Image (tube, grey):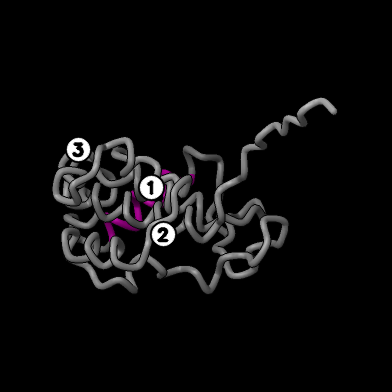
Amino acid sequence: MAPRYTVATKKAPNPIDQHVGSRVRMRRMMLAMGQQALGVALGLTFQQVQKYEKGTNRIGASRLQQISHILQVPVAFFFEGMASMPTTAAAPNASAPHGSNGSALSTVQIDDFVSSSDGLRLIGAFMRIDNAAVRRRIVMLVQEIAGDDGN
């Protein structure tokens, strides 16, 4: 009888692991901390931090506690927004904010934006604008550029 070989199939990351990882990435970037620096603080390589942030590798409870201490947030921070996450990949995100064109912004899209360097810079600059009327005009300008009438 010939030996049987199995081909390993690549398993998709769990959406919860991806959410927790994206929150780790968001907070790390908010602190202007690189993956290397977080890795050193955890005694890991930056590649392992990348895998955590992508949800490829699951973060254990003790490691998550360690990360929360380093990133100066409670463990619950990493699970914020989970109530609005779908329980399956195919389920709609009913509580997501909607654009004027009727398309829902997913939690993943929002996390991706907030985790990006451009998103963080934009949010930081926007929050430093004291004048509420100027902030509203900026939002209207961005909506106009995007072809969104804001309704």
**Would you name the residue on which mark 1 appears?**
53
Between residue 122 and residue 54, name the one nearer to us. 54
Q: Secondary structure at mark 1?
A: helix
Residue 141 visible, this angle: no
Q: Position of residue 149 (x, y in %)?
A: 55, 50
Quadrant placement of the C terminus:
bottom right
Say if the magenta span includes residue 137: yes
Distance from disc 2 to disc 1, alpha carbons, whole Å, reads 8 Å
Q: Nearer the viewer, residue 98 or 19?
A: 19
Residue 17 x %, y %: 48, 57
Which residue is depicted at the point 53% across and 74% down? Answer: 83
- The image shows a total of numbered marks equal to 3
**Alpha carbon of mark 3 to alpha carbon of mark 1: how far?**
13 Å
Q: Which residue occupies 55% across, 47% down?
A: 148
Q: Which residue is denoted by mark 3 in the rendering? A: 36
Task: Name the main secondary structure of what is drawn in magenta.
Answer: helix
Q: Is residue 87 magenta?
A: no
Q: Residues within 10 Å of mark 1 (few under 14, many from 20)?
A: many
Q: Earlier in the sequence, mark 3 or mark 1?
A: 3
| Residue type marked 1 | Glu
